[in-house]
Amino acid sequence: MKNIYKIVIALVSVLFLSCNADAVDNRPVLENLSVPVLPASLMAKTYVLAEENATEVVDNFVWSTAEYSQDVVVTYTLMMDKTGGDFSAAKVLATTSDVTEASVLVKTLNQAAIDLGAEPGKATEFDIKVKCSVSGGVGVVSENKATITVTAYSGLVPYAFTDWYLVGDATAAGWDTNNGNQPLFRSGTNAKLYKFTGYFKAGAFKLISNPGSWVPMYGMGAGGNLAYRGGDSDPDPATFNIATAGYYTFTMNLETLKYTLETYNVSAASTYSRVGFIGSSRTGNDTGWAGDDTPMTQSAFNSHFWTITINLFEGKGKFRANNAWDVNWGGDTAFSAYPTQGTSGGDIPVAKSKYKVYFNDLDGSYLMIPNQQ
């Protein structure tokens, strides 16, 4: 009797598998019947881009509808590559869903041109193609292409600020003007106000604004005033002096030409093993707020000072300790701020660029210098 049951079960199983196989074999196969085609009107178009028009639409690009053997939602990707390129490293200008046109901003076309090697101010040719794809399928790139000419602008982030750096045997750089010198942090509301709180060795220091050069320079003047040296032929100002190694706060005001140098009580400050940068500016979208932050490098000279060089997108950012949200710092102003001059717990606004970032966990000061190589 058991053998009869086994035979019946085996027959049912064979029939079930056979039916499923037939169902799979009989499913309609999705085929791409035609790819999108760019219009002849796009061929040989010329675009001269201007930075003051960055947020305006440079053109509305259109293409024909891709046809498939079934009714599906089609994703279109408008791509640009250098002339003669194979589009394996193309830049995406726009992505749409079932829409066969896209308005492209001046800044988007400009950035793509710069990323593909365009020299600012020089007319450069690029190829445009459209890729079509459906969910779960392999994208198909249009055979035809349009060759356009783009004259790009530099794409550099406007940065009308002067940064000042410490130099001297009381500082991490020593008397070397190009040794990763510690910058002062600039106020977020008054670009003439600067401050740095941190560790100094017993010794002396001055301030320079051009790493690798001794001019211009600020040193100590009489009566709490700054002394300025503008050129090589100008007299060398006196040094600011640190009698005892420890933590100090140095401030300077380039409107009044006054400075202060005061001891700082660091005994209650926390020391962190990790500080990182996080935010939408890491990825260009909200996924940049998720997961691990991007760790910064802690100074061996001053454990409260952190640096990183990083490519960032347009978005927002914050600093946080220990890869968690328990302790975090933000701000309201781009590029630089410190707590008593404009910083808050907000999200720091960031423009797309490569940055050298400096952060001080003693007071939340930050300095983000764009347009790095």
Image (spheres, rainbow, N blue to C red):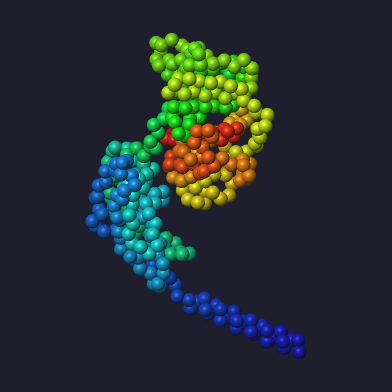
Q: Quadrant of residue 250?
A: top right
Residue 22 visible here:
yes
Q: Residue furthest right?
A: 1
The quarter of the picture where the N terminus appears is bottom right
Residue 271 left/right relative to 252: right
How many labels, in total?
0
Q: Residue at x 42, y 23 (%)?
A: 255
Q: Is residue 124 visible?
A: no
The residue at 49%/27% (across/down) is 194
Q: Position of residue 174 (x, y in %)?
A: 56, 19
Quadrant into which the C terminus falls: top left
Q: Residue 302's x, y, as percent?
A: 61, 28
Q: Which sits in the foreground, 291 or 65? A: 291
- The image quadrant of residue 30 is bottom left
Which residue is drawn at the image coordinates 44% and 16% (left, top)?
228
Residue 340 in the figure: left or right of residue 274: left
Viewer-proximal residue, 28 or 237?
A: 237
User: In percent of the image, x 52 and y 27: which residue is there?
Assistant: 195
Camera-nearest residue between 255 and 174: 255
Expressed as whole percent of the image width and height from the top left, the position of residue 130 reads: 35, 57
Front-most of 345 and 76?
Answer: 345
The answer to whether residue 33 is above or below residue 146 is below
Asked if residue 237 lies left or right of residue 270, the reply is left
